[in-house]
Image: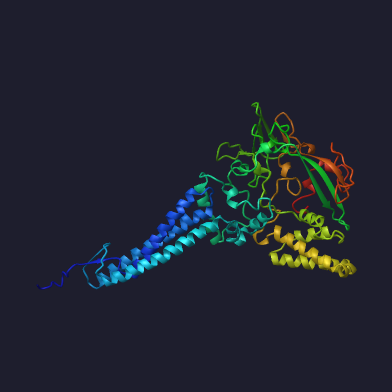
């Protein structure tokens, strides 16, 4: 038979005869195997983690896509090569054991599949375990998360995994956590994240679904005794100790009255408020709904009240744990708080003159980097004593060096200049020093339409039972039924007429 050169004989050939097809097929199958394993793990896990979802729904699908693209590319290259050579070939997905090239690449495919299957399965599941770890959240994106990671390890919740609070159990936040995890990674890669990271976290799950897994209003009741020792900014770093009864209160009628600080969280009451700033520090409108059906609205007569918008997308927020305990795991201590603790526990010698004053000044100064700050603290404190107390600088060099080390530790654990993060941008609402905290609502300017003022009596929340110039309450005058507060500095009656934060502000550091 004579061959027609214009119509060459049609050949049949499998597409599985190239190394690229073998590699692409192995990647695809290994990725599919890993995806199914991780999907079952994710669906059955009791907790959610945005980074775990990132592995399952971004990284693994990327492996699948890469394998599929490589396989399709191998088919395209085979077809193009056949056309260029004028071959009439029909490619199929059939297995062709008679083709030596196919057999060689079949073995290549099987070996690659075995290797990739082991590597991908082990590496993927290990990555899953790593995304569950606190270290992953804090150290993978080291610069971004360093402030949160460091302060977390110094918090009462240092044994609670990040995801337990930031995401919580259940499936309702499942999709949101996946999307948010991708957003965080993209922002980190593109270096487009805010410095400092914006707070509060707008999409944080309500405290009733996270905090109250361990804490709930019914377990709080009665009073708690608290002792605080402060040191003044004089040459002697003079101490002043205060002992007080905190009226914790709560919602267990069998243990005490339904009153005290945790009255705010009683399930019988409902408190709503509107903040006029994103950080919820200015609150001009509060609504209290009582169990008997009465509702009372307070507005700040000196602040403009925004338009009240109810509903899920509105600006009315229901008061919960996080409105006071907004730094349960990431507290950034002001300089005075940290120095008071260091002196009180003996890590800094109290008899170093003006130690507290100089320490606050050095910690509160503006630095571009952590390294610059640590050098400035060392040179500043040593230089101060060398210039003003030369004899002491020589005789007490060990104590001064120890104080330098402690101040540097305080800086490393509370100040993060690269992320522009410290106590001045991380408000702590659990008190009324440095930040307004309680004063955001409890002030005389907050009134009902009838002129009734919101409670401002300090004794509503705490009662002074001992106070005086000592480092402990031993020997101080005490009265468990209460004493009138004495300000450590003689400011006459000014403390009765002004809020603490008018002097103890976020710039002074105490």
| Residue furthest top as drawn | 292
Q: Residue furthest left?
A: 1
| Depth order, front residue of 312/242 | 242
- Residue 123 to residue 509: above or below: below
* Residue 35: quadrant of the picture: bottom left
**Residue drawn 60% across the image and 52% down it:** 161
Q: Quadrant of the N terminus?
A: bottom left
In the image, is residue 224 above or below residue 366?
above
Name the one closer to the observer, 252 or 322: 252
Residue 150: give x, y in percent of width and height. 66, 58
**Residue 285 visible in the current orientation:** no
Judge left or right: residue 129 versus residue 416: left
- Give the side of residue 95 with respect to residue 173, left or right: left
In percent of width and height, residue 425 lies at 68, 53
Measuring from the top left, give residue 171's x and y in whole percent.
Answer: 51, 45
Work out whether 399 lies above or below 285.
Answer: below
Q: Residue at x 85, y 60 (%)?
A: 354
């Amino acid at each position: 038979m004579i061959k027609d050169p214009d119509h060459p004989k049609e050949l049949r050939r499998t597409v599985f005869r190239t190394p690229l097809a073998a590699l692409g097929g192995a990647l695809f199958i290994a990725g599919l195997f890993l995806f199914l394993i991780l999907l079952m793990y994710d669906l059955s896990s009791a907790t959610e983690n945005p980074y775990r979802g990132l592995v399952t729904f971004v990284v693994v699908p990327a492996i699948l896509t890469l394998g599929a693209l490589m396989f399709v590319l191998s088919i395209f290259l085979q077809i193009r090569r056949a056309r260029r050579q004028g071959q009439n070939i029909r490619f199929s997905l059939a297995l062709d054991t008679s083709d030596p090239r196919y057999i060689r690449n079949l073995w290549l495919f099987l070996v690659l599949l075995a290797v990739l299957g082991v590597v991908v399965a082990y590496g993927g599941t290990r990555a899953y375990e790593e995304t569950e770890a606190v270290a992953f959240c804090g150290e993978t994106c080291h610069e971004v998360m360093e402030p949160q990671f460091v302060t977390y390890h110094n918090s009462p919740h240092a044994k609670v995994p990040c995801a337990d609070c930031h995401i919580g159990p259940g499936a309702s936040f499942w999709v949101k956590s996946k999307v948010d995890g991708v957003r965080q990674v993209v922002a980190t890669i593109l270096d487009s994240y805010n410095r400092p990271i914006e707070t509060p976290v707008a999409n944080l799950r309500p405290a009733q679904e996270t905090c109250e897994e361990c804490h709930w209003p019914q377990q709080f009741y009665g009073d708690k005794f608290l002792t605080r020792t402060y040191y003044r900014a004089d040459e002697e770093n003079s101490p002043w100790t205060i002992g007080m009864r905190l009226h914790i209160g709560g919602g267990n009628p069998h243990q005490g009255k339904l009153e005290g600080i945790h009255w705010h969280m009683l399930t019988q009451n409902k408190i709503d408020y509107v903040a006029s700033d994103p950080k919820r520090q200015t609150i001009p409108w509060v609504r209290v709904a009582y169990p008997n059906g009465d509702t009372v609205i307070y507005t700040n007569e000196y602040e403009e009240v925004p338009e009240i918008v109810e509903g899920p997308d509105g600006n009315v927020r229901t008061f919960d744990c996080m409105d006071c305990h907004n730094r349960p795991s990431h507290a950034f201590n002001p300089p005075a708080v940290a120095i008071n603790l260091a002196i009180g526990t003996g890590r800094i010698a109290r008899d170093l003159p003006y130690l507290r004053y100089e320490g606050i000044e050095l910690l509160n100064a503006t630095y571009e980097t952590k390294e610059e700050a640590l050098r400035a603290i060392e040179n500043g404190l040593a230089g101060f004593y060398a210039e003003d107390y030369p004899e002491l600088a020589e005789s007490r060099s060990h104590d001064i060096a120890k104080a330098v080390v402690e101040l540097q530790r305080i800086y490393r654990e509370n100040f993060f200049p690269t992320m522009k993060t410290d106590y001045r941008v991380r408000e702590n609402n659990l008190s009324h020093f440095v930040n307004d905290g309680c004063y955001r609502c409890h002030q005389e300017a907050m009134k009902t339409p009838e002129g009734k003022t919101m409670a401002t009596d300090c004794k509503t929340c705490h009662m002074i039972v001992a106070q005086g110039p000592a480092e402990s309450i031993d020997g101080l005058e005490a009265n468990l039924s209460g004493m009138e507060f004495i300000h450590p500095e003689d400011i006459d009656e000014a403390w009765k007429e002004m809020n603490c934060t008018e002097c103890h502000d976020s710039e002074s550091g105490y």
